Image (tube, rainbow, N blue to C red):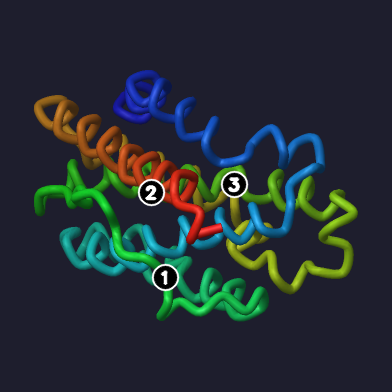
Amino acid sequence: MIADLLRKETANKHQELESLMFVNEIMNHSLSIEDYKTLLTINYIIHQKLENLLANMLDADLAGQLEMKSRFKLAALEQDLNYWQIDNLSLPGLDFELFIPQKNNAAVLGALYVLEGATLGGNVIKKHIMANPAFKGHEAGLNYYGVYGNELSTKWKAFVSLLNESVSEADYKSCIESANSTFQNLINLSKQFKSSPNNK
C-alpha cells in the first residue's frame, strides 16, 4: 500500500528534516523560545503557501471525503504567531524555488502526507514543550502542535485510508516524488533560517 511505501521512501528526508527542526531540544526540554518561534515561522510559511492551494487542487469529492476544511492549520499557526508577537508581514521571502505538485490527486496527496504527518507528532511535541520550564504558562501559544486535539488518531487513520484507496499503483512514483519534494521544501526553509542571522 502507498502509505507504507511513502513511509519507507521518505525516511531519509524525514530524518534530515528532524535534524533541522530541534527534535533533540524538544525531547530533552531544552528548546528555547527563540527556536520555537523559528519552528512556528517555518510551518507558517509552508502552510501559508501550500495549504489552500493543495486543497483546491484535489478533486472535489476527495476533498469532501477528507473534510479538508477541518484539516486547515493556518489559523492555528496565525494564533501562535500573534501570541508570540511575530509579525507575519515581515517574514522573509524564500531563497529557493518552492515545489508545488502537479494538479493530480496522487501528487497532491503525496504533499499532504507530509503536512498531515507533521501533525501526527504534534500532541507528543506539545507535551514535551509544556514540560520545558521556559514554556510554563504559555500553552496559549501552542495551538499548532495541538491542532487536532483528541481527533488526531481518527484524522490520521481516515487520511491514510483514503490515501491507500485513492492512489493507484501506476501513480505511486508521482505520489512518492511529491512527498519527498515537499519534505525538501521544509528542509530548504529550515536551512534558510539557520543560515541567516536576520531570521533569529
How much space separates mark 3 and mark 1, taking CA atoms? 32 Å
Q: Is residue 3 left or right of residue 178?
A: right
How much space separates mark 2 and mark 3, taking CA atoms? 28 Å
Q: Which mark is residue 153?
A: 3
Look at the picture and state if 48 lies above or below 58: below
| Residue that numbered label 1 is attached to | 91
Residue type at numbered disc 1: Leu
Give the secondary structure at mark 2: helix
Q: How many marks?
A: 3
Of pointers 3 and 1, the one earlier in the residue sequence: 1
Of pointers 1 and 2, the one earlier in the residue sequence: 1
Residue type at numbered disc 3: Ser
Residue in the picture at 78% in, 67% down: 139
In the rendered image, residue 87, in percent from the top left (x then y), is placed at 51, 79
- The quadrant the C terminus occupies is bottom right
| Residue that numbered label 2 is attached to | 189
Give the secondary structure at mark 1: loop
Q: Is residue 79 left or right of residue 157?
A: right
In the rendered image, residue 7, in percent from the top left (x then y), is placed at 41, 25
* Between 144 and 132, the one nearer to me in the picture: 132
